[in-house]
């Protein structure tokens, strides 16, 4: 793999050059936390962040997005017809995305890029986005990405993987998209791969060593769906939950959405908006009947979806990248690592006592 | 890339008020672009999203049969925002249809089999489509029995067609109402489960039941079918859940790992017995 050295003195100027070809999005400090936001011309991403408060999912899948526009004015041509927006996805570069958030796109893609239906909005945005990832040297206290198939130096879901090596970045060129970005930025300092990979390996080992929590997921697939569904622990898990939905909005792998028409006067738009399985209205029928009307049913749905239904459906692991955001931000300290442990243990064969 | 969220434009061609409470109307739609009718290639049991511009979309079973050409038909109960607005719309108005969505009843499996169709209330729409489809290919199927009930005679859907089917000898009709004070009522009085117990043919490997109705009817019909010896693999049901996308992406209609919209809405009872009861 090609590895490029980017001296930090060349970083800002390279980004500036790339901005002629890409819309740049990067970590930006807001109060005491960071978010991925479009970078105004000349503004550099703040690479001093640990991880952002919200995941990077909104860079491809905005929280609110216009699917169609329409006119209700009978004098207008095509009134009451839904009009697709013009191609609205200029080439975009997400600077400093963490490997966990990039891995989430791979997981979420399975939902939006199914064999029978493809979501053009998500896929066009994803295809027009280059992920300029920043390896993680200071994993957070709730991080467990190495338990979900990733790692702080895992570049597989990225286009470029940057390691912060003091006065320069070392950039692994993972994909053609990444190579094109490097070229547009004018960074050309190719270094000898073996030596650079050794640096990556050493930094990777140091970073992984800082990850304190691990979660076992090896028995989730074996567990019976109904046995897990009927497991005795859900009341306990859900007891403190206030159904605020914070976990689903922060989560890089939660993709559920609502579709709403919003009309102003005689014109309007059909919007797609993030939704949450934590909300009773998510599933309430027109009759008032609600298949997940109880809090415990909604909490169970969230964990069963991520740790069982998804596991069985795609046979590609859990629907979680171990970013730890839901663990850190849950107002009542519900911890997906503990829930996963309960579920995984339930999947183990019962120990037969022969005493 | 085809945009699966984009409805086909349609014009409301005809509106019929079906029931005495005026809460159910049948809409016939004609495609604005004739080639869209070709693309909207469906089988009985599938549904579509009716798109009312400015209000939203609702998933509704297709009530017309694929053997009926030139229009598609839906019977809509007035319940929420979209369906209430739809009830105020007029012939000639423009709206949209997105689909067909979901799986039809398993017509390949059903070929050569005896079928008992059991419906209650306004959940008779895809059953009407199925009956018309069966009658158009009558030699492909064995004995056909229909048990259909509503609260009162005035709450039955498609009354003219029911009367016409009554007169045929290649389909056994058992129409029933919960109660009536109409002295001229010449069909059954009694709940659907009771009539099922009396009139459904005995269950065997070659006999299938298709059930569509309110939860309470389904709950009590199942024991009746059990008594008659129906295998749970041969009991076919159509589920409903709140939906938005209709294509398995928005995440709300799931029952376990299955989406009612994309993996259903048709399931056998034996499948449902291995799934959470989240519908």
Image (tube, coloured by chain):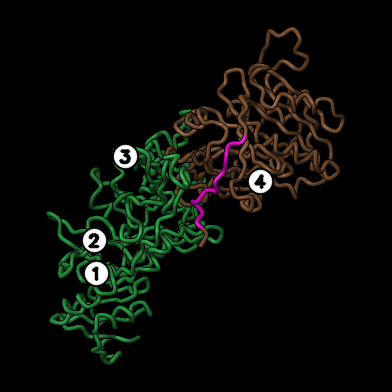
**Which secondary structure lies at badge 1?**
strand
Q: Is residue B229 left or right of residue A280?
A: right
Tag in front: 2 or 3? 2
Please state which of residues A95 and B213 is positioned toward the viewer in this rendering: A95
- Quadrant of residue B21 in the image? top right
Q: Which residues are magenta?
A: B3-13
**Which secondary structure lies at badge 4?**
loop
The residue pinned by badge 4 equals B104
The residue pinned by badge 3 equals A243
The structure residue drawn at horizontal position 43% and vertical position 62%, both measured from the top left corner, is A109
- Mark before the other along the chain sequence, 1 or 2: 2
Query: Which label is found at residue A113?
Result: none
Q: Is residue B143 left or right of residue A346?
A: right
Residue B89 seen in the figure: yes
Q: Chain of mark 1?
A: A
In three-dimensional space, the C-alpha distance between marks 3 and 1, rounded to whole angstroms, equals 31 Å
Tag in front: 3 or 1? 1
The residue pinned by badge 1 equals A96
Q: Chain of mark 4?
A: B
Q: Do the residues at pointers 2 and 3 share their chain?
A: yes
Q: Chain of mark 2?
A: A
Query: Which label is found at residue A36?
Result: 2
Q: Position of residue B151 (x, y in %)?
A: 63, 18
- The answer to whether the residues at label 1 and label 2 have Cβ atoms under 8 Å apart is yes
Residue A306 on the magenta segment: no
- In the rendered image, the residue lying farthest to the front is A75
In three-dimensional space, the C-alpha distance between marks 2 and 3, rounded to whole angstroms, equals 26 Å
Mark 1: give few (<14), some (14-19) or many (20+) Cα within 10 Å.
many
- Mark before the other along the chain sequence, 3 or 1: 1
In three-dimensional space, the C-alpha distance between marks 4 and 2, rounded to whole angstroms, equals 44 Å
In three-dimensional space, the C-alpha distance between marks 1 and 4, rounded to whole angstroms, equals 47 Å
């Amino acid at each position: 793999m090609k590895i490029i050295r980017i001296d930090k003195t060349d970083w800002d100027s390279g980004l500036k050059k790339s901005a002629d070809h890409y819309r740049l999005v990067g970590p930006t400090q807001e109060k005491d936390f960071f978010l991925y936001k479009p970078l105004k011309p000349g503004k550099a991403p703040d690479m001093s962040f640990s991880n952002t408060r919200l995941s990077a999912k909104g860079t491809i899948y905005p929280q609110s997005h216009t699917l169609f526009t329409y006119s209700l004015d009978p004098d207008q041509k095509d009134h009451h017809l839904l009009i697709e927006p013009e191609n609205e996805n200029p080439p975009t570069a997400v600077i400093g995305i963490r490997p966990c958030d990039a891995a989430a796109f791979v997981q979420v893609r399975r939902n939006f890029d199914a064999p029978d239906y493809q979501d053009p909005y998500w896929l066009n945005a994803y295809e027009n986005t280059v992920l300029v990832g920043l390896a993680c040297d200071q994993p957070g206290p709730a991080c467990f990405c190495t338990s979900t198939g990733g790692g702080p130096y895992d570049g597989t879901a990225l286009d470029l993987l940057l390691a912060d090596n003091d006065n320069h970045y070392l950039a692994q060129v993972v994909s053609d998209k990444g190579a094109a970005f490097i070229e547009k930025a004018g960074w050309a300092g190719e270094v000898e791969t073996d030596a650079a990979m050794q640096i990556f390996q050493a930094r990777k080992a140091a970073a992984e060593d800082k990850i304190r929590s691990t979660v076992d997921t090896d028995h989730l697939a074996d567990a019976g769906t109904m046995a897990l569904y009927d497991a005795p622990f859900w009341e306990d898990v859900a007891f403190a939950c206030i159904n605020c939905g914070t976990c689903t909005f922060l989560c890089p792998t939660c993709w559920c959405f609502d579709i709403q028409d919003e009309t102003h006067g005689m014109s309007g738009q059909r919007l797609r908006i993030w939704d949450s399985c934590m909300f009773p209205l998510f599933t309430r029928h027109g009759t008032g009947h609600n298949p997940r009307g109880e809090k415990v049913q909604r909490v169970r749905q969230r964990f069963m979806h991520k740790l069982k239904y998804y596991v069985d459906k795609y046979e590609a692991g859990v629907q979680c990248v171990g970013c730890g955001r839901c663990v850190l931000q849950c107002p009542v300290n519900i911890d997906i690592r503990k829930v996963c442990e309960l579920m995984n243990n339930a999947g183990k064969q019962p120990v037969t006592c022969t005493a | 890339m085809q945009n699966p969220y984009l409805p086909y434009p349609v014009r409301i061609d005809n509106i019929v008020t079906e029931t005495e409470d005026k809460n159910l109307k049948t809409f016939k739609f004609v495609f604005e672009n004739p080639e869209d009718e070709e693309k909207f290639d469906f089988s009985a049991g599938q549904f579509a999203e009716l798109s009312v511009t400015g209000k939203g979309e609702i998933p509704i079973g297709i009530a017309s049969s694929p053997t009926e050409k030139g229009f598609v038909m839906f019977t809509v109960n007035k319940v929420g925002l979209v369906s209430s607005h739809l009830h105020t719309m007029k012939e000639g108005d423009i709206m949209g249809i997105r689909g067909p969505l979901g799986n039809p009843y398993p017509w390949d499996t059903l070929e050569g089999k005896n079928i008992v169709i059991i419906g209650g209330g306004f959940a008779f729409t895809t059953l009407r489509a199925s009956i018309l489809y069966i009658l158009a290919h009558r030699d492909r199927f064995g004995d056909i029995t229909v048990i259909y009930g509503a609260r009162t005679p005035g709450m039955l859907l498609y009354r003219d067609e029911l009367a016409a089917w009554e007169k045929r000898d290649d389909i056994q009709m058992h129409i029933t109402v919960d109660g009536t004070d109409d002295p001229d009522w010449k069909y059954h009085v009694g709940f659907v489960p009771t009539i099922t117990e009396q009139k459904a043919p005995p269950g065997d490997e070659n006999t299938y039941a298709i059930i569509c109705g309110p939860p309470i009817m389904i709950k009590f019909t199942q024991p009746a079918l059990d008594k008659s010896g129906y295998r749970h693999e041969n009991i076919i049901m159509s589920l409903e859940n709140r939906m938005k996308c209709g294509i398995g992406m928005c995440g709300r209609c799931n029952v376990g790992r299955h989406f009612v919209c994309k993996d259903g809405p048709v399931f056998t009872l034996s499948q449902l017995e291995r799934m959470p009861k989240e519908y």
